[in-house]
Amino acid sequence: MKLSTPIELEYSRKNLLALLSYGGNPDQSPYTHKQISEWCERFWNKYNDVDVSEEIEKVMPILADVETQWDLYLANTYSSSQLQELDFETVRLPVEWFKDWSAEANA
């Protein structure tokens, strides 16, 4: 799968919350769910094997879940032939998931 144009935001809890809000309102978002998932994966990869602040440690499971659920959604929603022809930039995860992740990040 070809990578999207990267989201050029610093890896922080504040920016994660902003992206989750965009994910929950995809019609007003400048980013696709695919871009948000890829940003979460890069954020997680950057801090996975290092000591991080408590604020970053708290969002690490959310970052992993966003990326994992993206992959699972694709695998469970589309056939292999559909995936070969699919424009992934048009795929939208359920917006409730973004609202749940946002609530978890704010807990």
Image: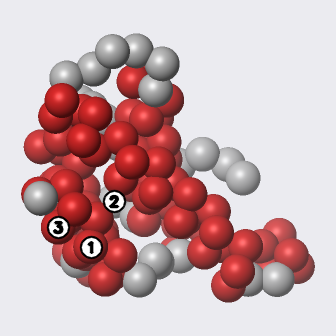
Crowding at mark 3 (Cα within 10 Å: few <14, some 14-19, many 20+): few
Q: Is residue 65 above or below residue 15?
A: below
Work out whether residue 30 can be spotted: no
- Secondary structure of residue under mark 2: loop
Check whether the beta carbons of the residues at disc 3 and disc 1 lie within 8 A of each other. Answer: yes
Q: Position of residue 44 (x, y in %)?
A: 43, 35
Which disc number belongs to residue 100? 1
Q: Position of residue 58 (x, y in %)?
A: 24, 41
Q: CA distance from mark 2 to mark 1?
A: 19 Å
Q: Quadrant of residue 32?
A: bottom left
Q: CA distance from mark 3 to mark 2?
A: 20 Å
Name the one closer to the observer, 105 or 34: 105
- The residue singled out by tag 3 in the image is 103
- Secondary structure of residue under mark 1: helix
Crowding at mark 2 (Cα within 10 Å: few <14, some 14-19, many 20+): some
Q: Is residue 47 left or right of residue 4?
A: left
Q: Is residue 82 left or right of residue 92?
A: right
Q: CA distance from mark 3 to mark 1?
A: 5 Å
- The residue singled out by tag 2 in the image is 31
Name the one closer to the observer, 83 or 53: 53
The residue type indicated by label 2 comes to Tyr
Q: Nearer the viewer, mark 2 or mark 1?
A: 1
